[in-house]
Amino acid sequence: MVPLIDFDKEQQKLYYSIGEVAEIFKVNTSLIRFWENEFEVLQPKKNKKGNRLFTTEDLSNLKLIYHLVKERGYTLDGAKKKLKDNKSDLEQQVEIRESLLKIRSYLEELKNQL
């Protein structure tokens, strides 16, 4: 399941370390580095030490990649093509899915309180 990232709450933070990103997505840092090499939409900044600094835009792109590769089972080439062909449709699908998951979570919480 794609992690639900509430960017409004996290908006104060401009950059995320690779460790924080890996923790958000519950994957290894090596997978994040691999995806960075494979997907040209991922362009984290690097500081003087060479540490990757991910922006909220990078997190949004990672969310799309995670959704395609981990949840939908796309190959890397298929995910690249899908991102390139219709990224806006994909973003909309992921947003709708997140909204429905939030509603589901809320309803389950209500049910448990009864």
Image (tube, rainbow, N blue to C red):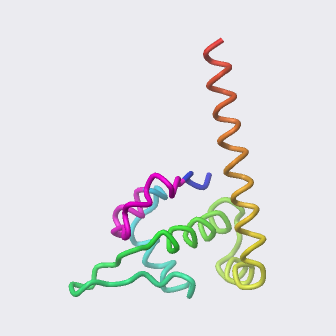
Q: Position of residue 39 (x, y in %)?
A: 57, 84
Q: Identify the magenta region.
A: 5-23
Q: Give the answer, above or below, for where 107 lies relative to 79.
A: above
Whether 25 is drawn above or below 14: the answer is above
Residue 24 higher or lower than 49, as above or below: above
**To which quarter of the image does residue 66 belong?**
bottom right
Assess whether residue 14 is covered by the magenta stretch.
yes
Q: Position of residue 12 (x, y in %)?
A: 38, 60
* Picture quadrant of residue 50: bottom left
- x 45%, y 56%: residue: 24
* Left/right of residue 44 with respect to residue 71 in the rendered view: left
Q: Quadrant of residue 48?
A: bottom left
- Residue 11 is situated, as x and y percent measured from the top left of the image, at 44, 60
Quarter of the C terminus within the rendering: top right
Q: Is residue 68 left or right of residue 7?
A: right
Residue at horizontal 62%, vertical 25%? Answer: 109
Q: Position of residue 55 (x, y in %)?
A: 44, 73
Residue 101 placement, left or right of 16: right
Residue under the point 55% across and 53% down: 3
